[in-house]
Amino acid sequence: MTELSYAHGTGTTALLGDTIGRNLDRAVAAWPGREALVDVPSGRRWTYAEFGAAVDELARALMASGVAKGDRVGIWAVNCPEWVLVQYATARIGAVMVNINPAYRAHELEYVLKQAGISLLAATLTHRTSDYRALVEQVRADCPDLRAVHYIGDDSWNELLSAAGQVTADQLAAREAELSCDDPINIQYTSGTTGFPKGATLSHHNILNNGYFVGELVAYTEQDRVCLPVPFYHCFGMVMGNLGITSHGACIVIPCPSFEPAAVLSAVQQERCTSLYGVPTMFIAELNLPDFASYDLSSLRTGIMAGSPCPVEVMKRVVAEMHMDEVSICYGMTETSPVSTQTRRDDDLERRTGTVGRVMPHIEVKVIDPATGVTLERGQSGELCTRGYSVMLGYWDQPERTAEAIDAGRWMHTGDLAVMREDGYVQIVGRIKDVIIRGGENIYPREIEEFLYRHPKIADVQVVGVPDERYGEEVLACVIPADPADPPALDDVRAFCEGQLAHYKIPRLLQILEAFPMTVSGKVRKVELREGYRR
């Protein structure tokens, strides 16, 4: 009998029943003198004892400012130590931290502030060309729930911390005693084909365990030092990174606020990092530095690559030239905390480049016929579904969208087309949804389309991804102009989006059409739009 495309990840290590705060307490007690956090740009360092004290100070400050259990606290910042402190401090007091992509502009920021009901926002002041204070002021009047904004590195941040003395350690402990590991603790926005982003709501149990087991599969101990150039606002940074690291007593190393290949390799060399994270395009950028060979990367042994498939030649160089013999490939989605499958330390090159690994401990995966829901035989292509501790609580305040994603059996439908091989390893072969993945960033066409409908020269628009050598996919806007004699130019479209949409969502390509290819039932055939585009 042919085996079905179903796998259940067994393991000898039990799930953690802690809250994030209690798990951090265990790490502080076990390794008080070991380094927990290093910020290379500023030179600041924290031992576990110091990190625990800093988390407690911020937790008490948030309580003093009126943050109650279940209140939403936004974090809108590039990678910095304060981001990590907010992550653990909100978890310690039962507030729900809402991750906001630092590339967001006014249009997107306003939506998230309103939809999540954020009452307190911690934000970066500036980064590159972004003035975060100006963007907040642009939308603040329309966000009635937002009562306080504190800017990292500003007097307002110091004022927040100065209030910590108003709350005692006993009061903080009493708050923690009210918390359950199943409480919602984090909202991460992920779009869908239906339009605006949905807030995937995750519990302590979801993300603490996922980070812990990712760390288990790359064999983290308190001896490891992990370089994290991936953004904290993604699960990649804050779950697979931060929580995977602190649950093993290892050290978080922040190389730069946002990705810079030379800064990453310099941090690995300086801090003697044993692990490095990144999407394939990050590793390619590092390997292609003219002075790559001058960096001493001999301390590396492992790392995690995720976000998109890794080319074989890139993997060969990562193993041979970056010394990452045990590098691991992970696959997942925000709604599953995120990792469902992962390669193992001893997997060969083919499994690391041809698959996304096999099922994680304590998780189930299956491949089904999207039309019938029946589990397919191994080797057949269908929709990948995931079930287990990692599946989100739901989309924030959107029960209908939750019901569309999670079925009655608590299976999360990923929307990805996959094949489970005879050996249990999974290959991702396509996407049911029209998500564009550009350099590891998920881009959802409907959101961009909804925004571009406002352009006075655009009568109709469809957004698709087309192959791109550098980023994997690039954003193409297919436009039917309001006046065929006066169609919009690409520069017009890009200028219209500037300051309103995140830079990676702004179309890089434009095609003017008289009509869209349609199905008999009246749906746009996006596959033909992709295939029909010629650069």
Image (spheres, rainbow, N blue to C red):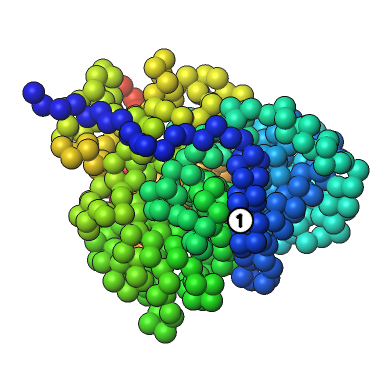
- Residue neighbourhood size for the residue with mark 1, other residues' Cα within 10 Å, grouped as few (<14), some (14–19), many (≥20): some
Residue, far right: 166
Residue 123 drawn at (x, y percent)? 72, 52
Toward the viewer: 66 or 122? 66
Classify residue 88 by image quadrant: top right
Q: Is residue 257 above or below residue 438?
A: below
Residue, far front: 30
Residue 319 drawn at (x, y percent)? 30, 67
Q: Residue at x 48, y 44 (%)?
A: 212
Give the quadrant of the N terminus: top left
Residue, far top: 408
Toward the viewer: 287 or 370? 287
Please tell me whether mark 1 sits on a helix, a strand or a loop: loop
Toward the viewer: 13 or 490? 13
Classify residue 516 by image quadrant: top left
Residue 135 drawn at (x, y percent)? 73, 51
Residue 421 drawn at (x, y percent)? 18, 39
Mark 1 belongs to which amino acid? Answer: Trp
Residue 496 visible from this viewpoint: no
Left-right relation of 221 to 423:
right
Residue 20 visible from this viewpoint: yes
Q: Is residue 87 above or below residue 158?
A: above
Q: Residue at x 66, y 41 (%)?
A: 21
Count of numbered labels shown in the rendering: 1
Left-right relation of 211 to 346:
right
Q: Is residue 498 above or below residue 513?
A: below
- The residue singled out by tag 1 in the image is 31
Q: Residue at x 61, y 45 (%)?
A: 26
Classify residue 364 by image quadrant: top left
Give the quadrant of the C terminus: bottom left
Left-right relation of 316 to 113:
left
